[in-house]
Image (cartoon, coloured by chain):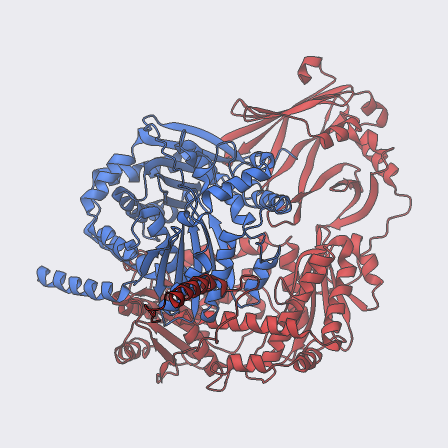
Chain colours: A blue, B red
Amino acid sequence: MKNFISVIILCLNAEFLLSQKIDFHEYDLDNGLHVILHQDASVPLVVTSVMYHVGAKDENPERTGFAHFFEHLLFEGTKNIPKGEFMKIVESNGGSLNANTSNDRTYYYEFFPSNKLELGLWLESERLMHPVINQIGVDTQNEVVKEEKRLGVDNSPYGHLFEQILQSLFKKHPYKWTTIGSMDHLDAATLEEFQEFNKKYYVPNNGVLVLAGNFEIDEAKRMVEDYFGPIPRGNEIPRINIKEDPISQETRKEFFDANIQIPMVLVCYRTPSMKNRDAYVLDMISTILSDGKSSRLYKKMVDEKKISLEVQAVNVGLEDYGGYVILSLPLGENSLDDLLFNIEEEVVKLQNELISEREYGKLQNIFENTFVSSNASMAGVANSLARYYMLYGNTNLINEQIDIYKSITREEIREVARKYLNKNQRAIIDYLPKKDESQ
Amino acid sequence: MKVNKKNMKNLSITLLFLLIFSSLSYGQIDRSKPPKSGPAPVINLGKPQTFTLKNGMKVLVVENHKLPRAYANLSIDNKPDYEGEIKGVSSLVSSLMGNGTKSISKDEFNEEVDYMGATLSLSASGGYVSSLKRYFPRGLELMADALINPIFPQEEYDKQKNILIDNIKSYEKSVQDIAVRVNGKLVYGSSHPFGEFSTIESVNNISLDDVINYYQTYAKPNNAYLTIVGDVDFDKIKKSVTKLFNKWKKGNIAELALPESLDLDQIEVNFVDMPNAVQSEIYVNNLIRISMAHPDYFALKLANQILGGSATARLFMNLREDKGFTYGSYSSASTSRYISSFSASASVRNEVTDSSVVEIIKEINRIRTEDVSEEELVGVKEKYVGSFIMSTERPSTIAGYALNIDKFDLPEDFYETYLENFQKVTIEDIQRVANKYFLADNLRIVVVGKGSEILNSLEKLPYKMSFYDTYANLTTKPDFSKPKGISKTTIINKYLDAIGGREKIESVNALMTMGEAALQGGAMTISLVTIQAKPNKISVMMLMMGNVMMKQVFNGEEGYIMQQGQKIPFPEEEKQKLLSTSLPFEELSWFDDENVVFSFVSEEEGTKEYVLKTDEKTTVYFDANTGLKTKEVTLVPTPDGKVAPQSTVYDDYREVDGILFPFVIKVPMGPQLLDFHIKQIQVNPNISDSDFN
């Protein structure tokens, strides 16, 4: 009987993988720009996006915040797009746009009704080919970025969270600073430095262009060549190679945030690159601990014991290393040590006991569901294609990643918990409210 | 292209031609302006398959096999009902549902939903479930069970009721939230379901029986729509839906007539005074009666888009970009089968409240009397076209459209001709609908703000004024006139007399205070030690568990701030402030300080207080009876770019060496107050200059 059931499950999976497959076509232009095309005639839109392999970790330690600053600067205008017009052109053509920067890469995208593909290509190629980087633009965006830091970090409750995690886990690697960077560094930077940065990283051989949506492949290829072909190749891009010493001693520190009233405890572990199989296992461990009302930490700390307002386990995946963080906010007068004790108890349980078959089944379902949903929108597909190509070196992970999750065993989950989530490997942060010193 | 080998000349010409041609292949594109768009994409809107159960529930199914998942959305489309004395009962029903059923405990229910990787929620007016294809039948079954057989345990009821009351309390002082509720009630009328809101009183009126009764009355299939979208098979799903939902019994839902909402016969300003307001909330409204099926729908949407539909529309460009009055100003013109409203709104700085009203009305009049430009019209059409086209990427859109057609009695081809109908709208149409729906002579202007600062200028506007409290009850005009015989000098003198007399105060050369506050319910203690001395010397030290967390020192000439081991020089602005004051009692310097003025009389919660404004950001409150200082309110910037008041409260005055000092000082920490209890005060202690190093 049991065998019979597994055959049915296998069939289900086969059917599922078949209907799920994302077809794509990828190639390089002569100037080194990597191009990925995903055609889907069932949607009425097209996404044009470019990911550049430059993030906060590529910055000069004396000039942090540069990568993110560029995400702003490169909307300032180009030789053919007057200052401030980029957004208006997109809006009055019924499209929308956005961009974001991480420690590893910078990503720009627009989406338009599918008859505007050429417009999207023009906008993105102008950004790469003809950016106007002048003092006016730098000064304008300097103000904007400062405002962003004020709103998003300095005045935002728990705004220093990520910064504190990174500082706890990284001592040498540039992951120790956040993407927003230092305002002093940005103030001190000269126009020439910005132009240099652009010349070094914003070159076709450091980017991947993704088109996803409704278009004709041949026509799209021709247009890509027309708009991006004439852009000259840049120099070879230098990559950092900095290794951290292993963490072998528990640390604990306090941080005070004036914008909060409820404290938080964070337990942080340094983990390997998101490309490593163990990182996938850690994703699963997060789900066991805190995904859904029946997850271990939630059920115990929030629902039953009522000692916590919220508890979350998060695996922060980055290209060179990762961070595994469990955070919790106390309910009422419960202490942070109390939370820590309960968190530790569950981590130790994962190291000593295999998860149940039932929980294992739940994991499979949740990851399958996430996988299916992640490809539900063209914007999501475009982002995944760019990320898997650039950061993982395997575009087809968009179809294969689920196999990795499915192959993870209960024993592996226990092993990975034993390997990375030990007491002497953790950095604890007491994230506490601070009285506002202006009062 | 064939090359004639015999003719070298021709060959070279051909090569030359090829070269030119290939360079032209780049040159063909003109980079100097945005490329032209191709023909607009054809939209293939799926049509749902439908059936109706005997109990009246209509089911719409959209098969979409692109991804192996599905979702079901249930919406009960009852006519809006008035909850009245027990307003809030529907919210309570919603928060209780979806936590177990008569046959499955809460824990088992939650575990199973999680196991399937599904999402499931329920409310008094519907429900939602989404999951992988293979779990969808079970997900739907759980939703149906939770809907038809819910449990309402006393314990969960008590918990949810407390949460609801906490929520209401939490916005009692929020100018934005009060403005929304007052505006709704004034626009639609106090006995209209669109106008009522929950109060602590109404929630306290609710009993568990009311909750159960509400569920039993309204959670009926009579007017229900179940939409199912995704990788399902119509025949199979029809079978299982029929089986699951046939058990849901039809009932009688009394359809009460909605009370008539009344238009104004002239422009009227409805003012609500909130003394804590640092910005004014303005809503300029009139009722409109237009359903989606009306032919004016398209022109009205575009007219509103031009007026205030986005951050590139007229209201925004005028009030924010041009005048800098506000962070944003927008308008909306919603449609409804019952009644709806046109509304233009903005949150603006106190001092420009009247000018903002004037500008909003000006923009409403402009779109009624002047042609919009061709460029504006084309721009907003494109925006609608783009977002409509792109919305069809989501299968949920198709379901939503099908539902609208049925609910709102739209023509079958409403969405097929949707873009065409937008394109047909002319410049004349915009002006016509603006006149028909933006009623410039019947606007209700609701302003919630700080009367003492804005009422004078508002009253100069040529409109009728009436006054309301924060519950939208008619009230009398608040009195902000300053009482005779009261001035800055009398307020400060009364305060000094109250705490020990001016002579006594002036004789204090130095002062040391030590206070403590408990954090995390007593798990930690913060201590604050302050030493002040003439002339203008101050040292403030904050300690936590014996460690110095922060230290500020000013020795009368210069100072520094030390924080987490970092020492930064005293900000110049702070330095100037300290130099012009008279520590240890800064009030002594206020007699001659021109920046300090008597601002207004505050009457909150039955206490009369005189308020001095000491600088742009700070006001200080004195009890009119006792003369004692009660609080200090400072404006601080908030994350969303606005400003918010933060109060430091002084309480429990006690005598030390003939002078009264507050022994409880409540300091804001986030949205809460941290209570410092004074443990020690020394008047004229022995101090040396080294205390200020």
Residue under the image location 32 percent in, 44 percent down? A274
Q: Nearer the viewer, residue B477 or B550?
A: B550
Q: Position of residue B605 (x, y in %)?
A: 71, 50
Residue under the image location 65 percent in, 67 percent down? B308
Residue B184: image quadrant is: bottom right
Q: Nearer the viewer, residue A67 or B104?
A: A67
Is A177 on the left-hand or right-hand side of B602? Answer: left
Q: Position of residue A331 (x, y in %)?
A: 45, 43
Residue under the image location 73 percent in, 28 percent down? B575
Q: Position of residue B177 (x, y in %)?
A: 62, 58
Q: Is residue B104 above or below residue B607?
A: below
Q: Is residue A18 above or below residue B571?
A: below
> Is residue B554 visible to the viewer in this orientation of the structure?
yes
Q: Nearer the viewer, residue B400 or B171?
A: B400
Is B563 on the left-hand or right-hand side of B436? Answer: left
Q: Position of residue B135 (x, y in %)?
A: 26, 65
Q: Is residue A195 above or below residue B261?
A: above
Q: Residue furthest bottom?
A: B411
Q: How many marks?
A: 0
> Is residue B190 visible to the viewer in this orientation of the structure?
no
Quarter in which the N terminus of chain A is drawn: bottom left
Quarter in which the C terminus of chain A is drawn: top right
